[in-house]
Amino acid sequence: MTQQAFRCLASPAAVTAPDAADLARLAARLALRALHDELSLYPKPGLVSPRDAGSHEDMDAGTFLRSLFALRHYYARIAAAGWHDADFPVLRDLGIAAETRMLRATGGVNTHRGAIFALGLLAAAGASLWRRGVPPDDAAWRAEVPRRWGRGLRLAGAAAGTPSHGMQVAMRYRASGARGEALAGFPAVFDLALPALRQARSGGADWQATRLHAFFTLLAEVEDTNLLYRGGQAGLEWMRGEARAFLADGSVFSPGWFARAQAVHRQACARRLSPGGSADMLAAACFVFGWQAHMEAA
Ligand SMILES: CC(C)(COP(=O)(O)OP(=O)(O)OC[C@H]1O[C@@H](n2cnc3c(N)ncnc32)[C@H](O[C@H]2O[C@H](COP(=O)(O)OP(=O)(O)OP(=O)(O)O)[C@@H](O)[C@H]2O)[C@@H]1O)[C@@H](O)C(=O)NCCC(=O)NCCS
Ligand SMILES: Nc1ncnc2[nH]cnc12
């Protein structure tokens, strides 16, 4: 989208309900597409895809599709809240309600908690930028979540009741997990996955290879609390080592990449490892990538 179009959207006359509704619908469509881009990618080490259930016994691609369907209104709502400059408790309550709908749709299985959190915050931030006429480039977007909702995120801290897997891992390994990622302005999205998506795209890779390159780039670096919870530090380091070796061997730009990625997937399944946090970061990067491409084309 051109600077001129942004200035027009930023003018008081342009800040009308139909614009907010259009943006909310767009955010929801792009978020669901991004979640589908993540789910449909194969091979992803240890993760669920339409081909198999990876390291999981309690869910498959059908579970994820039901979860996706249950989240269809959530991303529109949280984008609209971001447009209207909602405070952190409003976003948090929308996220908690979405978690409840997800768990109802999946029979109690946690498919998308991390994605509800990360893509929800990014959708709210993108909508806020749009309303103010700020082009949604990486620098503006990554600054928006900590700037607007950082205090709420820091104060949200630990909830009462049984500590989540993320909290258990935070205590044991000092890993900052999903909340730390948001507070730092999503470095996994903006420093790792997005540059990798762009590199693969400009190198002529198709969409499957592009996502796979971005996913292994994430696996090589992200401190994924799901890997720590199931596999400890050794599990996290094993996954990072495999991903780094895959990238050093030429990633998707050298022949045989599919078989090499599939071999890592099979080994991750044998170890029962599942990098769910990295999967969420891939979906978040696909979401930003899709949004920016949409704005470029508009
Ligand atoms: C802030 C919350 C997201 C709470 O997070 P908390 O730190 O308490 O930890 P978890 O409840 O464990 O959830 C965090 C999920 O975030 C993903 N994640 C992990 N590492 C990272 C990372 N480095 N960066 C970003 N994101 C990360 C990950 O999500 C995926 O895993 C989920 C499955 O997890 P789990 O059930 O533990 O795994 P299983 O394999 O099923 O368990 P076992 O079989 O091993 O027993 C899956 O959903 C993926 O999405 C982490 O799990 C949050 O809960 C919160 O505050 N929510 C409020 C509402 C909200 O979202 N608001 C929106 C805007 S404010
Ligand atoms: N495809 C996937 N498989 C398992 N856990 C996940 N968490 C997010 N996406 C996932």
Image (tube, rainbow, N blue to C red):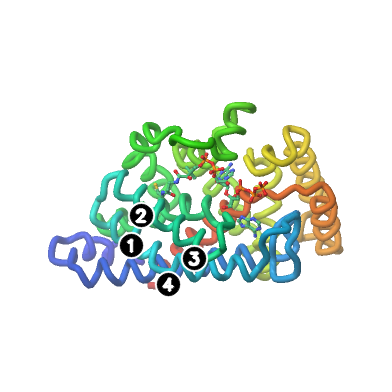
List the residue tagged with mark 4.
297
Comparing 119 with 8, the one in front is: 119
- Cα distance between the residues tagged 4 and 3: 11 Å
Amino acid on which the number 1 mark rests in the picture:
Arg
Of helix, strand and loop, which one carries label 2? helix
The residue at 71%/43% (across/down) is: 220
Q: How far across and how far down the image is residue 239, in percent? A: 76, 44
The quarter holding residue 191 reads top right
Of helix, strand and loop, which one carries label 3? helix
Ligand 1 within 8 Å, label 2 CB: yes
Residue 2 in the image: above or below residue 183 = below
Q: Are marks 1 and 2 in contact (CB under 8 Å)?
A: yes
Q: Are marks 3 and 2 in contact (CB under 8 Å)?
A: no
Q: How far across and how far down the image is residue 211, in percent? A: 65, 61
The residue at 59%/52% (across/down) is: 193
Q: Which mark is residue 77?
A: 1
Of helix, strand and loop, which one carries label 1? helix
Q: Earlier in the sequence, mark 2 or mark 4?
A: 2
- Cα distance between the residues tagged 3 and 1: 19 Å
List the residue tagged with mark 3.
290
- Cα distance between the residues tagged 3 and 2: 23 Å
The residue at 59%/57% (across/down) is: 109
Counting every numbered tag in the picture gives: 4
The residue at 55%/70% (across/down) is: 66
Q: How far across and how far down the image is residue 11, in percent? A: 17, 61
The quarter holding residue 292 reads bottom left
List the residue tagged with mark 2.
94
Crowd tier of the residue under label 1, counting other residues whose Cα lies within 10 Å: few below 14, some 14–19, many 20 or above = many
Amino acid on which the number 2 mark rests in the picture:
Leu
